[in-house]
Image (cartoon, rainbow, N blue to C red):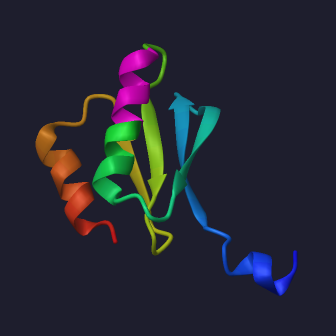
């Protein structure tokens, strides 16, 4: 990668989707996307696939947040506010 290319490179975060302890897939999330949008993306994936039990979301500071399938609106709001 040249110096010119690195200035246009966008760092991605990820959401990991799990069935119990088994990691099924990762979803790339652009760093420009807000935490709220990333959480909505994770919830949509869990709604689409009934075997998913939870998602692990990494915020911009590298902190991991576990989002269970049964997360209430308050839990999702809590994560979207506290995740940086």
Residue 16, image x and y in percent?
55, 42
Q: Residue furthest top?
A: 50
- Horizontal side, residue 20 vs residue 36: left or right: right
Image point 87% across, 80% down: which residue? Answer: 2
Q: Quadrant of residue 1?
A: bottom right
Residue 60, image x and y in percent?
45, 70
Comparing 19 with 28, the one in front is 28
Q: In which quadrant will I find the C terminus?
A: bottom left
Range covered by the magenta-colored residues: 42-49
Image point 42% across, 17% down: which residue? Answer: 48
Q: Is residue 4 above or below residue 19?
A: below
Q: Residue furthest left?
A: 74
Residue 66, image x and y in percent?
40, 48
Image point 46% across, 16% down: which residue? Answer: 49
Q: Quadrant of residue 32?
A: bottom left
Image point 25% across, 57% down: which residue? Answer: 80
Q: Residue furthest right?
A: 1
- Magenta: main secondary structure equals helix
- Horizontal side, residue 59 vs residue 77: left or right: right
Residue 74, image x and y in percent?
12, 46
- Horizontal side, residue 61 vs residue 84: left or right: right
Comparing 43 with 20, the one in front is 43
Q: Is residue 26 above or below residue 62?
A: above
Magenta highlight on residue 67: no
């Amino acid at each position: 990668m040249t110096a010119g290319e690195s200035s246009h490179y966008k760092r991605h975060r990820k959401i990991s989707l799990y069935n119990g302890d088994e990691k099924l897939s990762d979803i790339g999330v652009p760093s420009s996307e807000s935490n709220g949008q990333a959480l909505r993306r994770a919830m949509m994936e869990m709604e689409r696939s009934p075997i998913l039990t939870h998602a692990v979301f990494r915020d911009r500071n590298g902190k991991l947040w576990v989002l269970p399938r049964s997360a209430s609106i308050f839990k999702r709001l809590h994560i979207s506010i506290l995740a940086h």
